[in-house]
Amino acid sequence: MEKNTQTLYSQIDKYLSENSSQIKKLNKGDIVEGTIVDAQNGYIVVDVGYKSEGIVAGRELRSENVDWRELRPGDTTLVYVVKPEDDKGQLVLSIRRTQQASAWIALEKARKDNSVVETVVIESNNGGLIVEINKDIRGFIPTSQLDASRVYLNGVRQVGKDISSRVQKRLNSLVGEKIRTKIIELDREKNKIILSEKMVTQARDLEQREKTLNKIKEGDVLKGTVSGITPFGIFVNAQGLEGLVHLSELSWDKVEDIGNIYAVGNEVDVMVIGISDGGKRVAYSVKRLQNDPWSEAIAQFKVGDVVKGEIQKVVPYGAFVRIEKGLNGLIHISELSDKLVKNPEDIVEVGQKVDVKILSISSTERHLGLSLKEAGKKNTVVKEESVEISKEDLADAVDSAIEEEISIKE
């Protein structure tokens, strides 16, 4: 009796030690291969080596890759574990979710590799776009992660009244469009996928930027698009390389209102005048592609000429006068009148047309020294020694004028 018992225990140990006889451990979400045991109308029975056979029924039979109606006992197929054990103790399996699980695995790989995911817009809401990635798998692209050109006029992000309604209209118009994205967040358990189009377009822009940066040099002329407007100049994107055209490089003439000259989206030719910090700072110029009116001005005017001008700005030390486009000068306070002038506004005002005499022409400083009082003296040629203001005072005035012009531009 004892010998028989020992033999039985030995046989049980041998059976349990064999891998083929061990019962598999299954978890929800596992994908395993099984053998068809039975196929009936509306369900199939599958043996996956578990403690009980599994059931695939109803909608879990539907799959684009497998037609369950063609399955026969003895056939093998991949199945997805929905529940290792339901309320009745049955193993619940799915063929449909095998395809979906494979898609999730592919998406997890795409996130890890930072690769592009193709999507189709199926719906829009206040926060962004709902897109379809694969059948039964959807994702969400927040408005902030869309390329600005899809959402905002001229591709520039805007804020303010009525902007949200206009943005929503543009989002609605995107339904049905294909969008290339990258994955920001992926949570299979919560069926949550957050995507970004900007990550794709920015990568493309960075690639274009590097190509442009590697082939250009100072003095090159590029075609670009105005990407932003500020009080101190405009930003231009030229072949993926964004740079600043400072106010002082927009025109040879003074620019009072940039918005009257440029708008976001305008095409413009620019000259590269500076590249620093490995391309992080790029300076462009528009005016250097234009004729310098100063060169023409010094050819047609000379010291002693009386010319017509318009008062542009009145300052404590005098008044700025525009002679013609690109040609400006300063009337020092001492040259406003033969009488002592304490406040230039007592003599001239902005917009007033005046006759002025040219006292000096500085090519290096691109500046004219002007006199209002001398212009009224007929047939008088002003010599350097007869000018009432000293060289030192005139130099100080010119320096102040230059600083004032710079401050105006900025």
Image (tube, grey):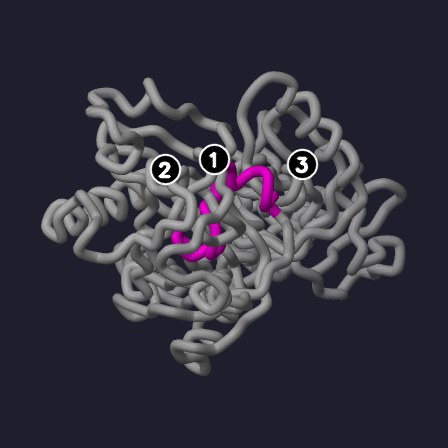
Residue 361, position as x, y percentages in the image:
33, 59
The answer to whether the residues at label 1 and label 2 have Cβ atoms under 8 Å apart is: yes
Q: Quadrant of the N terminus?
A: bottom left
Tell me which residue sits at (76%, 65%) in the image. Answer: 75
> Disc 2 marks which amino acid?
Leu
For this rendering, which residue is in front, 405 or 392?
392
Secondary structure beneath dot 3 equals strand
Secondary structure beneath dot 1 equals strand
**Among the two numbered marks 1 and 3 on one chain, the one whose residue lies closer to the N terminus:** 3
Residue underneath mark 3: 130
Residue underneath mark 1: 354
Left/right placement of residue 221 relative to residue 129 reads left
Q: Which residues are magenta?
A: 246-264
For this rendering, which residue is in front, 198 or 163?
163
Left/right placement of residue 83 relative to residue 252 reads right
Can the viewer see residue 60?
yes
* Residue 150 found in image quarter: top right
> Disc 3 marks which amino acid?
Ile
For this rendering, which residue is in front, 396 or 301?
301
Instruction: Name the residue at the bottom extreme.
Output: 215
* Residue 74 found in image quarter: bottom right
> Disc 1 marks which amino acid?
Val
Can the viewer see residue 48?
no
Residue 398, position as x, y percentages in the image:
23, 48
Residue underneath mark 2: 372
